[in-house]
Image: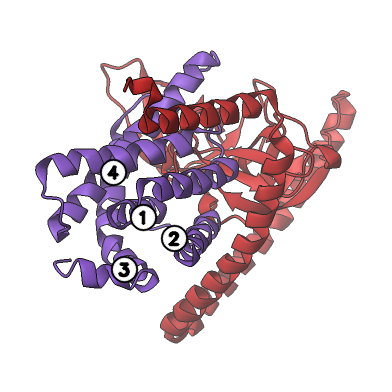
Chain colours: A red, B purple
Amino acid sequence: MRFIYSKTFRWAFGIFLFIALLFILDTSGYLNAPKSLVQRVFGTVGGSFKKVFDLTKDTAVTIGTIKNLARENAGLNQQIDELSAENARLQSAKLENQTLRRTLGFAEQASYKMVPAEVLILDPTGFVQIIVIDKGEANGLQLGQAVIVSPGILVGRVTKTYRTTSEITLITDPTMTINAEVSDSGARGLLKGEHGISLILDLVTQNEVIKSGDRLITSGLAGDFPRGLLIGEINAIKSSSSELFQQAFVSPIVDLRNLRFVFVIQ
Amino acid sequence: MMRFIKILGVLLFICLLLGSSSFNLFNAAPNLILIFLCLNLLTSTRKETIILSLVAGVILDFVSALPDGVISLSLLIAVFGSYYITSMFFAKSLSRVMVLVMIFLATIIYFISIEILHAVILFVRDQAILEFGQTQIRKLIKEIVLNVLFLYPAYLVHVWLNPQITNQNESI
């Protein structure tokens, strides 16, 4: 019997056809509706599992740390006092800035319109750093919009939209590049994701001053993200006099694998 | 048929757990679906394993952000590839070492297969291909360790679903 009439060949050919069809339908966008539905169902049910896991974990952690609560509370109270004082100073600076802008005839900085969204799924394969949120084209989401968590911390960008859901590529994905600026020194560089582990700030010239603990914000240079969104903190620097540029390893401010609510800037 | 539905149910449950990212340990997760499919191929028919692989693969394809078809095909390649390689070196009867080697190989083949298929699709779509570096190797090592660690619990669940296995393969 020739091989093409064998059962094995028929099975292999059937599988090949099935996967090719899946790929073609996905590329042409015909699978958007069923994908969106599966993402919603899995997101909702999986979310319930996550809540139970988180509750169990939180309870265990609370029991473990209960003896340190008083000391931690005192520390946090002190931190609140310091932040309140800093907030008052910043409010005053903001007012001064607005007055000066008006005097000099500069354009007022626009306030953003934000769409709140709940995270449905974090990519389960780990090969790409992507989350799925419960808002889509029906809510006015468009490709390229920045995604933040409440206090203006950047988490990613909208990279695919369906009718009722959207895919957000996180800042730690290797395909992401962000024009970043060190908030203290104003040193600029290009930030790249490192497969969900951290970020690398590259192309920082040797004469720029950067140090561990410095915070990075979006520079808004390429127009892909609004200026001033907090990205992360430098935790190590790789610099050599023989190299043109210095590099820095950056940790995101938020735990990107445990996001629950985000805001899309429109 | 009942057994098939039970295994399918367990696979869907694992997909849900993976979707909820509750299983993340050290920035990696055990690939329980791959373990289950390998165990299923060792104790059941090829036809059943193909159907289960495609069902679980399509769901993961839909839930993940990788191009559709990549996970389905990688699961099939990993499960059957590792099976054929191990059966070349081991006797037909099951043993602990054979299962361990099969999971070890399946994890590596699955990882490489996803990376290659993803790169090919990016190339076809004229998008930038990502470099294969230390980060991926670290991830692969973590996944191998986690898969080997989670093999025994997964095997116990598999035996619970198929009580006849213990009678057939006392050696495991």
Q: Check disc 1: other Cα within 10 Å, few if <14, some if 14-19, many if 20+.
A: many
Q: Position of residue B169 (x, y in %)?
A: 19, 66
Callout 2 secondary element: loop
Query: Of the residues tagged 2 and 3, which is closer to the observer?
Result: 3
Name the chain under label 4: B
Name the chain under label 2: B
Q: In the rendering, which numbered label is found on residue B106? A: 4
Q: Which residue is mark 2?
A: B23
Cα–Cα gap, marks 1 and 2: 8 Å
Name the chain under label 3: B
What is the three-letter code of the residue carrying label 3?
Pro
Relative to A191, say whether A69 is above or below. below
Relative to A175, say whether B150 is above or below. below
Q: Position of residue B130 (x, y in %)?
A: 42, 24
- Earlier-in-chain disc, 1 versus 2: 2
- Earlier-in-chain disc, 1 versus 3: 1
Query: In the rendered structure, are the residues bearing label 1 and label 2 in contact, judged by CB atoms less than 8 Å apart?
Result: yes
Q: Which residue is mark 1?
A: B30
Quarter that holds the C terminus of chain A: top right
Cα–Cα gap, marks 1 and 3: 12 Å
Name the chain under label 1: B
Cα–Cα gap, marks 1 and 4: 12 Å
Q: Check disc 2: other Cα within 10 Å, few if <14, some if 14-19, many if 20+.
A: some
Q: Position of residue B28 (x, y in %)?
A: 38, 51
Observer-nearest of B57 and A207: B57
Q: Which residue is mark 3?
A: B153
- Earlier-in-chain disc, 2 versus 3: 2
What is the three-letter code of the residue carrying label 1?
Pro
Numbered-mark total = 4
**Quarter-wise, where is residue A158 in the image?**
top right
Residue A209 in sight in this render: no
Query: Of the residues tagged 1 and 4, which is closer to the observer?
Result: 4
